[in-house]
């Protein structure tokens, strides 16, 4: 059986991971940050639902949660059932998420996105082709 030997530098890194961290106006309980993960679980109207509340609450012991990317307008949506944060219903849905995280002393920030022209008419209201293109991103014929 091998025995792991740690230098004092290694031990310091391990110890620091669970120490609080000051990030601007936020004080994080530790240095673990949850990466943004698109889940495609938003409800009708792209509203974060109960499953999102449970999921984010379960991760509240991280120093900081970065939410799944969330569109800033209907036109900014690029994938099915991603949440938005432009309607009152969506904001109320996110409030339920943040309340659950804060109740467990967690910190959460939102990742905003507008996917631009990678969107598809099927994801746009009335099949709108706003920003969408059939053409490849790069003109390889040149
Ligand atoms: C299912 C899934 C969904 C993801 N969603 C997002 C997202 O919404 N926003 C983002 O910036 N990155 C997203 N990512 C990228 C992850 O945040 C990334 O994989 C993570 O930071 C780990 O980095 P690595 O894959 O380079 O190791 C996603 C990754 C996966 C696997």
Image (cartoon, helix red, strand yellow):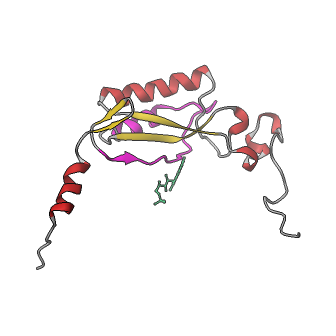
Task: Describe residue 122's horizontal placement relative to residue 30 as left or right.
Answer: right
Q: Position of residue 109 (x, y in %)?
A: 46, 35
The residue lying toward the viewer, choosing from 39 and 106, is 106
- Can residue 106 be found in the magenta stretch? no
The residue positioned 63% from the left and 23% from the top of the image is: 87
Quarter of the image that includes the C terminus? bottom right
- Can residue 50 be found in the magenta stretch? yes
The residue positioned 47% from the left and 24% from the top of the image is: 95
The magenta stretch spans which residues? 31-58
The residue positioned 40% from the left and 38% from the top of the image is: 56
Quarter of the image that includes the N terminus? bottom left
The residue lying toward the viewer, choosing from 22 and 48, is 22
Q: Is residue 138 above or below residue 74?
A: below
Image-quadrant location for residue 70: top right
The residue lying toward the viewer, choosing from 31 and 96, is 31
Image-quadrant location for residue 136: bottom right
Task: Describe residue 114's horizontal placement relative to residue 141 as left or right.
Answer: left
Q: Position of residue 62 (x, y in %)?
A: 32, 42
The secondary structure that dominates the magenta segment is: loop
Q: Position of residue 5 (x, y in %)?
A: 13, 71
């Amino acid at each position: 059986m091998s025995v792991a030997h740690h230098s004092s530098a290694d031990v310091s890194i391990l110890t620091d991971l669970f120490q609080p961290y000051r990030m601007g106006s936020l004080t994080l309980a530790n240095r673990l940050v949850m990466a943004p993960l698109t889940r495609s679980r938003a409800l009708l109207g792209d509203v974060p639902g109960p499953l999102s509340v449970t999921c984010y609450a379960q991760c509240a012991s991280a120093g900081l949660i970065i939410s799944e990317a969330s569109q800033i307008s209907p036109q900014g949506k690029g994938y099915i059932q991603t949440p938005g944060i432009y309607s009152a219903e969506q904001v109320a849905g996110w409030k339920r998420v943040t309340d659950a995280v804060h109740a467990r002393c967690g910190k959460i920030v939102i990742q905003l996105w507008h996917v631009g022209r990678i969107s598809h008419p099927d994801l746009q209201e009335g099949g709108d082709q706003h920003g969408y293109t059939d053409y490849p991103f790069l003109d390889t014929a040149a």
